[in-house]
Image (cartoon, rainbow, N blue to C red):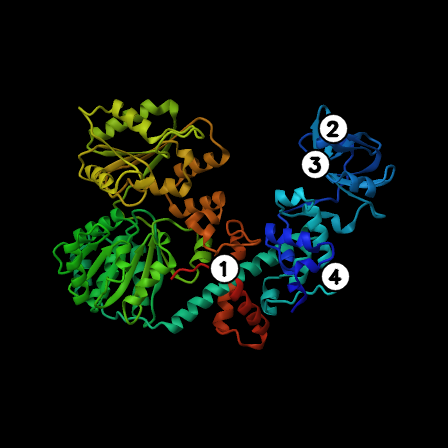
């Protein structure tokens, strides 16, 4: 067993009680766990301030002086130890609410000390609560504390006297132990190419850096290493999968594909659509199973691309399927695809949880005997009773709403696993896609059809509400329809945001039912009632739909030209962009109006400004990533992929790209990592894959 795998209880200064606390509170079981519990920030202690120079806005500072007197204040149960501290320019009070006996025994009056903490102004005088107190070295301070690390601790730990300073001392004990040694885990050529410091130096300097430059180099090395092994694992898995799984060969471009392309296409394909079809075509005729992620902004034409890929499968004697997360979205795909195909000899059916028993039996028989070519549906498609005759291509829409196991069930529906295309209308930042879906090939449709007009987005406050209502009436007079979306369904005492019910009542007053029809949709409605209201809007019987974000995905009403988002500051950027995508689906000019209160946070202002400045979903997703972090996007906080110790993919994009390039180059040269130069790397990687949590796409 290596030194770092030693149980934490055996480290000097820990003991049984502290070991138990470190395990329960921070998950620190071994010396290695302590070593990789990195500081969340560092404070430069190289500068010594004068008490007379302190101002109320100062952060943590360092002082040098003498304690002139100790005194105990307060009642017995709430006593505090107070010390007068002077540096010759002025006086300051040092305050301890706990550990008074130990403080008085270890700190002597009249002796010189370095004091470090955050000054606070109280009753006209400055004090410093629970400061760090050290004896100065000859040059004025302890050398290893020039840049001081701060560690995450819990309230329970603090209450039992284990604070950041205790963790700092324990970590220093570990690093200065003569047995402390860190073997290298990256090949020498990668270290040299990217000018990385050694692993041992990085892990020493990340805790106790000698300078800001050394800290930056340590962070770069550890971030690179972390991202490199994530990318290596993803790319290795992708390589292994291509070796293991032979794919169905879809070699022919046949009559159905050509007929559709030449006679049925309602518009000229964009260059992006043509490029994506070409990429998919290369996959499906390669003899290896395709696993491709198709990203395309709202309205970019993913469905047409999906249909043309399905026609490739049918032309080669195979069936195809589309699985969507909701019945509404599945029905929309069914309507769009049957409309596009017209009277072409392609049998398309829809299977959802609400399909009647008799029709369901008919559909199951049709897919089993091969007479049904395309099956569109929800989770119902992956039930065991759904057996295909010859499934060649599966398409999964809004893929992040399905779990790995659900997606993998499609693989068992044919002797050879079908080709797999997963689609999303939620633009994923490149760095996030590289980390979450690095084992997939990626295609992007990054341009809209030529007949689409850009949606005009404006910001309005409460003062403009009547003007907004007037604009709605103008658009409705032209025969258009309007969405009004609210963040809440019912009254919330905690948030001062308009709610759906109040909004519906106000809209109904402004737009009376003798002139207008208003429908309402929200997530708490019964599915049958929700569908009835949706259909009223789809058929044009209602001019205004008042809704929550239930309409974010799945409603396609080309006649709707106005999207009004109430309390827009309440929504995330990605959600705002998805909601805006509900309009702009026809040839007419469309509008998105963001209604907010007067006071906006800095993040709120940035979200609103970003929405008004651009319609580009990928630009928006990059801003969203920086605002929210990767954990909240795509539900990745629970996925395990982004369980990062030190790297931040929103800030470390360059390092991520370098790490992926390095991993790809290494596997291109040595796919199994068996060369002598990669032996240490292989050993580490084997252990790494055993112990790392990892969610991957099927």
**Crowding at mark 1 (Cα within 10 Å: few <14, some 14-19, many 20+):** few
Give coordinates of residue 626: x percent, y percent. Answer: 49, 45
Mark 2 to mark 1 CA distance (whole Å): 50 Å
Mark 3 to mark 4 CA distance (whole Å): 31 Å
Indicate the quadrant where residue 269 lies. Answer: bottom left
Tell me if residue 546 can be seen: yes
**Crowding at mark 3 (Cα within 10 Å: few <14, some 14-19, many 20+):** some
Q: Nearer the viewer, mark 3 or mark 2?
A: 2
In terms of sequence position, does the residue under pointer 2 or pointer 1 come before the other?
Answer: 2
Q: Which labelled disc corresponds to residue 90?
A: none
Tell me if residue 210 can be seen: no
Indicate the quadrant where residue 59 lies. Answer: top right
Indicate the quadrant where residue 487 lies. Answer: top left
In terms of sequence position, does the residue under pointer 3 or pointer 4 come before the other?
Answer: 3
The residue indicated by pointer 4 is 177
Mark 3 to mark 2 CA distance (whole Å): 22 Å
The residue indicated by pointer 2 is 74
Give coordinates of residue 634: x percent, y percent. Answer: 41, 50
Quarter of the image for the C terminus: give it: bottom left
Give coordinates of residue 480: x percent, y percent. Answer: 22, 34
Q: Which labelled disc corresponds to residue 693?
A: 1
Q: Residue furthest front?
A: 76
Question: Circles 1 and 3: CB distance less than 8 Å?
Answer: no
Nearest the camera: 478 or 284?
284
- When the figure is inspected, residue 638 is found, relative to residue 522, above or below; the finding is below
In terms of sequence position, does the residue under pointer 3 or pointer 2 come before the other?
Answer: 2
């Amino acid at each position: 067993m290596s030194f770092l795998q030693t149980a934490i209880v055996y480290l000097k200064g820990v003991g049984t009680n502290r070991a138990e606390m470190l395990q329960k509170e921070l998950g620190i079981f071994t010396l290695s766990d302590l070593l990789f519990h990195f500081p969340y920030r560092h404070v430069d202690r190289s500068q010594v301030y004068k008490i007379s120079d302190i101002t109320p806005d100062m952060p943590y500072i360092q002082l040098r002086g003498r304690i002139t007197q100790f005194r105990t204040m307060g009642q017995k149960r709430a006593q505090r130890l107070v010390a007068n501290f002077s540096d010759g320019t002025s006086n300051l009070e040092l305050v301890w609410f706990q550990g008074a006996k130990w403080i008085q025994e270890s700190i002597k009056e009249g002796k010189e000390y370095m004091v470090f903490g955050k000054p606070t102004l109280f009753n006209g005088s400055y004090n410093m609560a629970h400061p760090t107190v050290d004896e100065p070295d000859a040059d004025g301070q302890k050398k290893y504390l020039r840049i001081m690390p701060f560690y995450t601790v819990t309230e329970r730990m603090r209450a039992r006297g284990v604070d950041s300073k205790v963790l700092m001392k324990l970590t220093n004990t570990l690093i200065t132990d003569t047995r402390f040694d860190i073997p290298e885990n990256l090949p020498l050529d990668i270290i040299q190419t990217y000018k990385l410091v050694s692993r041992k130096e990085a892990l020493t300097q990340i805790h106790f850096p000698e300078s800001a430059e050394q800290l930056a180099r340590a962070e770069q090395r550890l971030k690179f290493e972390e991202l490199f092994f994530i990318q290596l694992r993803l790319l290795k898995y992708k390589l292994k999968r291509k070796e293991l799984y032979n794919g169905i060969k879809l070699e022919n471009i046949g009559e159905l594909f050509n007929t559709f392309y030449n006679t049925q296409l309602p518009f000229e394909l964009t260059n992006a659509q043509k490029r994506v079809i070409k990429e998919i075509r290369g996959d499906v005729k390669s003899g290896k199973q395709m696993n491709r992620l198709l990203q395309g902004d709202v309205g970019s034409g993913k469905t047409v691309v999906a249909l043309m890929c399905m026609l490739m499968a049918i032309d080669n004697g195979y069936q195809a399927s589309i699985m969507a997360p909701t019945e509404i979205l599945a029905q929309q795909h069914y309507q769009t695809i049957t409309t596009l195909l017209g009277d072409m000899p392609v049998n398309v059916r829809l299977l959802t949880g609400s399909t009647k028993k008799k029709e369901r039996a008919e559909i199951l028989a049709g897919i089993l005997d091969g007479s049904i070519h395309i099956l569109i549906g929800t989770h119902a498609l992956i039930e065991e009773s759904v057996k295909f005759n010859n499934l060649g291509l599966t398409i999964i829409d809004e893929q992040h709403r399905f779990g790995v196991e659900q997606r993998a069930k499609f693989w068992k529906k044919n002797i050879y696993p079908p080709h797999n295309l997963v689609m999303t209308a939620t633009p994923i930042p490149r760095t996030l896609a590289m980390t979450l879906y690095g084992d997939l090939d990626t295609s992007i449709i990054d341009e809209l059809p030529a007949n689409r007009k850009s949606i005009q987005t404006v910001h309005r406050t409460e003062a403009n509400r009547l003007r907004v209502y007037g604009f709605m009436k103008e658009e409705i007079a032209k025969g258009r329809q309007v969405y009004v979306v609210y963040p809440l369904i019912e009254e919330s005492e905690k948030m001062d945001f308009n709610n759906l019910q109040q909004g519906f009542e106000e809209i109904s007053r402004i737009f009376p039912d003798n002139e207008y029809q208003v429908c309402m949709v929200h997530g708490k409605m019964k599915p049958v009632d929700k569908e009835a209201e949706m259909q009223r809007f789809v058929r044009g019987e209602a001019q205004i739909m008042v809704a929550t974000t239930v309409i974010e995905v799945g409603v396609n009403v080309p006649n709707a030209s106005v999207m009004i988002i109430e309390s827009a500051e309440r929504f995330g950027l990605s959600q705002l962009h998805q909601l805006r995508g509900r309009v702009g689906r026809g040839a007419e000019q469309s509008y998105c109006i963001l209604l907010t209160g007067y006071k906006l946070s800095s993040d709120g202002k940035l979200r609103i400004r970003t929405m008004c400045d651009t319609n580009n979903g990928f630009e928006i997703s990059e801003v969203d990533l920086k605002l929210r972090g990767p954990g909240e996007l795509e539900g990745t906080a629970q996925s395990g992929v982004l369980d990062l110790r030190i790297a931040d993919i929103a800030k470390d994009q360059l390092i991520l790209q370098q790490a992926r390039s390095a991993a790809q180059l290494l596997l291109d040269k040595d796919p199994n990592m068996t060369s002598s130069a990669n032996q240490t790397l292989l050993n580490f990687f084997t252990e790494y894959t055993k112990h790392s949590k990892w969610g991957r796409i099927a």
